[in-house]
Amino acid sequence: MEEKRIFQALVARGADFERLDEGHLALSFHRDGLGQRYGLIWSRVISHTRALYALSILNGWGLRTVNSYQTVLTCGDKVLTTGALVRHGIPTPRTTVAFDVETALAAMEEMGYPVVLKPAVGSWGRLLCRVNDRETAEAVLTHKAALGGPSHNVFYIQEYIPKPDRDIRVLVVGDEVVYAVYRRAEHWITNTARGAQTLPCPLTPAIADLSLAAARAVGGGILAVDLLEDADGRLLVSEVNHTPEFHGAMQAVDTDIAGKMADYVLEQFRIATTLSREEE
């Protein structure tokens, strides 16, 4: 649904564009015809790995992309996202990374239960686990280690924030906050992919300022910032997503979301075209 709305918005603005399927692209590290043909690439690739490698090559050519390789690299990895947020002074839940079971177990004990165990790379609320006690921690950590592979031996441990059965999803497009919505669910995981209900959320200055700061910390572009409210009402940035879906928000806010995105991308195209002409 989102992609159809985006295409409609581009058509309505008279944009000259083509849809590319990354599965059918063979990208040479040396700038080829694709780099000469397009002034900008807007990536909506679902696969993080495909998006990351493709954008690395495209940006390596000097081709402007939305979002950039660096932004996708940072947002696609929770370890890198948290590092960027902390370096820029953005409030975020306490987080520890460990690389073996015993060290991870000790970190959980020190942080205090419950804690949340997340995969470093992942989306849609998958493979998240709330660990309530030592017995559960031992079972989950041992199970992950037994699965093998580097991804299962990186333990991203975050304090559990007892939020009020909801989180806040904010869409940032460039320097503009387009909307804020609540994602409400009875389950502690409040992703819409897991069935959360999307409701309007007042866009307060505190929400807008924090979301803009978080977006800038990871490189900017078209980004979805996820906020948590702690028991004292303080806002914390949980994650920043580089390829935001918005079908749930479409039901909750009266905003032309795809149009806002299209306007930003076309402005980035105009900037890229101007810079290219100046270089010539």
Image (tube, rainbow, N blue to C red):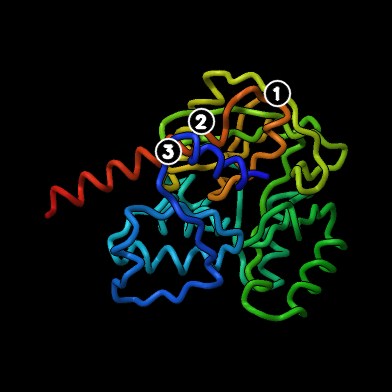
Label 2 vs label 3, nearer the camera: 3
Q: Measuring from the top left, give residue 192's x and y in whole percent.
A: 76, 43
Asked where in the image residue 76 lies, by quadrant, the reply is: bottom right
The residue closer to the viewer here, 182 or 261, is: 261
Q: Say which mark, if any, is on residue 5.
A: none
Asked where in the image residue 141 lies, by quadrant, the reply is: bottom right
Q: Earlier in the sequence, mark 1 or mark 2?
A: 1
Label 1 vs label 3, nearer the camera: 3
Q: Amino acid at mark 2?
A: Leu
Q: Say which mark, if any, is on residue 200.
A: 1
Specify few, some or many for label 2: CA neighbours under 10 Å numbering under 14, 14-19, or 20 or more: some
Report helix, strand or loop for mark 2: helix
Q: Earlier in the sequence, mark 1 or mark 3?
A: 3
How much space separates mark 1 and mark 3, taking CA atoms?
31 Å
Q: Residue at x 65, y 39 (%)?
A: 246
Q: Amino acid at mark 3?
A: Gly
How much space separates mark 2 and mark 3, taking CA atoms?
34 Å
Q: Measuring from the top left, give residue 255's x and y in whole percent.
A: 60, 25
Q: Say which mark, if any, is on residue 14.
A: 3
Callouts 1 and 3 close, C-beta under 8 Å: no
Report helix, strand or loop for mark 3: loop
Q: Measuring from the top left, give residue 10's x and y in whole percent.
A: 48, 40
Q: Amino acid at mark 1?
A: Pro
Report helix, strand or loop for mark 1: strand
Q: Which residue is mark 2?
A: 210
Q: Residue at x 45, y 29 (%)?
A: 176
Quarter of the image with the C terminus is: bottom left
Q: Residue at x 62, y 28 (%)?
A: 180
Q: Earlier in the sequence, mark 2 or mark 3?
A: 3
